[in-house]
Amino acid sequence: NPDFDVRSAARNWDVDKTTTATPVELVSSLFASDVLTLEQLKTRLSKPAYKSLQATVERGEQLDASIADTVALAMKTWAMEKGATHYTHWFQPLTGSTAEKHDSFLNPAGDGVAIMSFSGKELIQAEPDASSFPSGGLRATFEARGYTAWDPSSPAFIIRHTNGATLCIPSVFASWTGEALDLKTPLLRSVEALNKAVTPALKLFGASEGTRVGSSLGAEQEYFLIDEEYYYRRTDLVMSGRTLFGAQPPRGQELEDHYFGAIPDRVLSFMTDAEMQLYALGIPVKTRHNEVAPGQFEIAPIFEDSNIAADHQQLIMQVLRTTARKYGLVALLHEKPFAGINGSGKHCNWSMSTNKGENLLDPGETPHENMQFLFFCAAVIKAVDEHQDLLRACVASASNDHRLGANEAPPAILSIFLGSELTDIFDRLVSGQGGSGKSAGLMGLGSSVLPEIPVHAGDRNRTSPFAFTGNKFEFRAVGSSQSISFPITVLNTIVADAVVALTAELEAALEGSDLDAAVSKVVRGTYQKYQRIIFNGDGYSSAWHEEAERERGLLNLRTTLDAIAHLNSEKNAELFAKFGILSGRELDARQEIMYDIYFKTVNIEGETTEYVAQTQILPAALSYLAELGQAGGGRAAQGVSQEVGGVTDELYDALQKLREHNAALGGDEVHEKAHHMRDAVLPAMSDVRGAADRLERLVAGKFWPMPIYRQMLFVK
Ligand code: ADP
Ligand code: MG
C-alpha cells in the first residue's frame, strides 16, 4: 500500500544528535577553522615568504616559485594538525562540477619507516589523467595529458568525511599546450580584465593610486528535499535528477502556504548541520527559508569576491548533497525536478567593488558617488543589451530549458528590471529635467545637470531575468545545478567591454566640459541607445514576449541549442579574445562540450523514459487490466477496463516511437545528435509521459510502481 510508506518515510530519520556550536563558539572558533587563511599562514611562514605570497594573493602579482617549498611545508603541517592524511588539487573541469584526485602525504623512507611529506613541486603542479575530462577537442588524442596548477588566490581548505580529512588546494586545469580545460582559468582572467577596464574610468572620477577593482558575488541556491526512500524507488530521479513521470498532485503550490513557512524539524536539523560545516569552511551562509514550491528550500551566503564565491558555491552544493543523506533525505539541485511545480534557480547577485570596499553599483551618499554610479549602471545596461546572446548561452543547459524556455520565471528573453525610481532618473536625464525624482525621500544631488537618486530603490520584480536590486544586479536565469563560474566570467567580461567603450566616450566628452556635464552626456546617450533592454513589467506575460521580439527586437533563444549556437559567433569570439579570456579554440571547445552534455543528458533521459515505461509502467497497467478482467462483466469493471485499456494502448504506441528515436541518434556529429534529442526524443518522451501520467490517475494504487508527487512533495 503506497500510503503506508508515507508514514514510515516521514519517521525515517534518526541521526545521533549532531553537536552544534554555541553562538560564542561559532564566532570564536568555528568560522573558517578548516580554511588556511593568510592570517594562519602569517604565523607559519618567514616574513619574506609571507610578503611574497601576500603580494600574489592580494595584488595579483606573479607567484614566486622559490617560496613553494616553505608554503607546502606550512600547508602540510596545518593540514595534519586538522587530521588530514591526504591532499588534492581541487579543480573545476568543464563538466560543471569539481574534481579531486587524492594523494597521501605518506612516503616510505626505507626499512619499514614512513614519513609525511609534501613538496613545493607537488603543491604547484599535479597531473591528473586529462583524458577522462571533457576537452572539446583541445586535447589531441596523442597528447592526453593535462595539468592542474595551484591557484594561490583562493585559500586551501579541509574537507572532512566520516573517518578522515583531505587538504584541498584550489587549482586551475589546463592542457600541456596551455589551453584552459576548466571553468576557473577564464574566471580569473575575467576578474583581471575587469580590473584593467574599470580602474582607468575610476581615475577619471578621482580614484586614488593603487585602487583595484573586482567583482562581488552572492548566489542564492534553491533546492528540493525529498525522502531518501522515495528517491531510490524512482529510477528517473536516480538516473537523471528529475522526475520523467508524475501526474500533478491534487494540491500544488496554489495555497501559497509553504513560502517562508515554518521549517520542519528534520529539514531544519539538516540545514543547521550543513551550515556548521559551511561555517568551518569559511563560507558565510546567512539565509535559509522555505521556497515557493512544496519541498523546496533556499540557502544564501553573504556575497564575497567572485572567485572565492565560485569556489564556495561548489562547496555549498556538495555539502547540501552529502549532508541530506545523514537525515534520510536527498537534496535535488536539478532545475526542474517536478513538472508543473516551481523550478529551482541560482540567483547570482553581482556587483563591482574596489579594494577599499567601495561598491561601484551603490548609488551612494554624495553627488559625486551618484555620478559614478550612473556611469557604471549605464555600462551594465549597454553590456546586457549588446550581449543578450552570451548571457542566455552561459546559463543554457538541457535542465535549465525547463525553466527558461517554458512559461516560468525568468523567461529566456534577456531584459533589465531597473525599478520605477531608477528608470525615472534615467528618463529625467534624457529629457534634461534634472531635479527631484518622482518618489519621496530622494536625496539631494546638488547638481544642475543630474537628477536626484533615491536612497533605496524600492520596488521588486520577481519575473525579470536581470534585476537591479538597490546596490547590485541580480542575474536570475542561472540554473540551480550549474557552476556559477562561467556566468560570472561573462558578466565580468561584457561589463569590462562596455566600461572601456564608455570611458573612451567620457574622455572625449571631457574635452571642453566638466565631469558632471560629461557624465551626464555619456549616460544620457547610452540610455537612449539601449533603452529597449529595460523592462519593468511582467516577464511571464505573452504580451511581453510579443513586444520583446516584434517591437524591441530582443533575442528570444528558447532552447539551449538556439542559445549555444551564438556562443562562438564572430562578435563573441572577438570579445573573449580582446580581453584574453578565451581564445577562439578555447571558446569553440566550450561550445562543443555544451552540445555534447546536452546530447548526453537528453539521451539518458530518453533511455530512462523508455526503460521505466516499458518495464515498470506498462506492466503495472497490464496487471491492472488482467485483474479487471477477472472482476466479472459489471458495468464498472468494463468501463474502467476500457478506459485503462485505451490509455495503455496510447502508451504502447508512444513508446514504440520513443524507442525508434532513442535508437536512431540522428547522426554522427554531436550537433546532429543534440538536435535529434531536442526535436525528436524530447517530444517522444513527452508523449510517453502524457499517457503514463494519465494512467497514474487510473491504475489501482497497489499496482503503481513508484512513489508519486503527492508523497514525494509533502512528506517532510
Ligand atoms: P533577495 O531579497 O533577492 O532574496 P537578499 O537581499 O537576501 O536577496 O540578498 C541576496 C544576495 O545578494 C546575498 O547573497 C547578498 O549577500 C548579495 N549581495 C548584497 N550586496 C551585494 C553586492 N554588493 N554584490 C554582490 N552581492 C551582493
Ligand atoms: Mg533574490
Image (tube, rainbow, N blue to C red):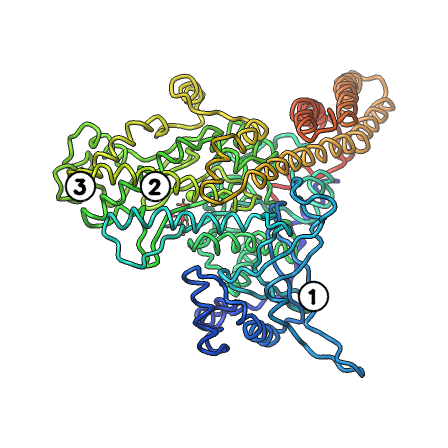
Q: Are marks 2 and 1 in contact (CB under 8 Å)?
A: no
Secondary element at tag 3: helix
Q: Are marks 1 and 3 in contact (CB under 8 Å)?
A: no
Pointer 2: what residue? 499
Residue 443 visible to an observer of this rendering: yes
What residue is shown at x 57% (from left), y 51% (from top)?
A: 317
Three-letter amino acid code of the residue under disc 1? Asp
Query: Compared to 115, does 181 lie above or below?
Result: above
> Which numbered disc flags the more N-terminal residue, 1 or 3?
1
Pointer 3: what residue? 516
Q: For residue 332, which numbered disc appears in the image?
A: none
Secondary element at tag 1: strand
Q: Position of residue 513 (x, y in %)?
A: 15, 39
Q: CA gap, disc 2 to disc 3?
A: 18 Å
Query: Compared to 189, does 538 lie above or below?
Result: above
Q: Quadrant of residue 357?
A: bottom left
Tell whether 128 sits left or right of 531: right
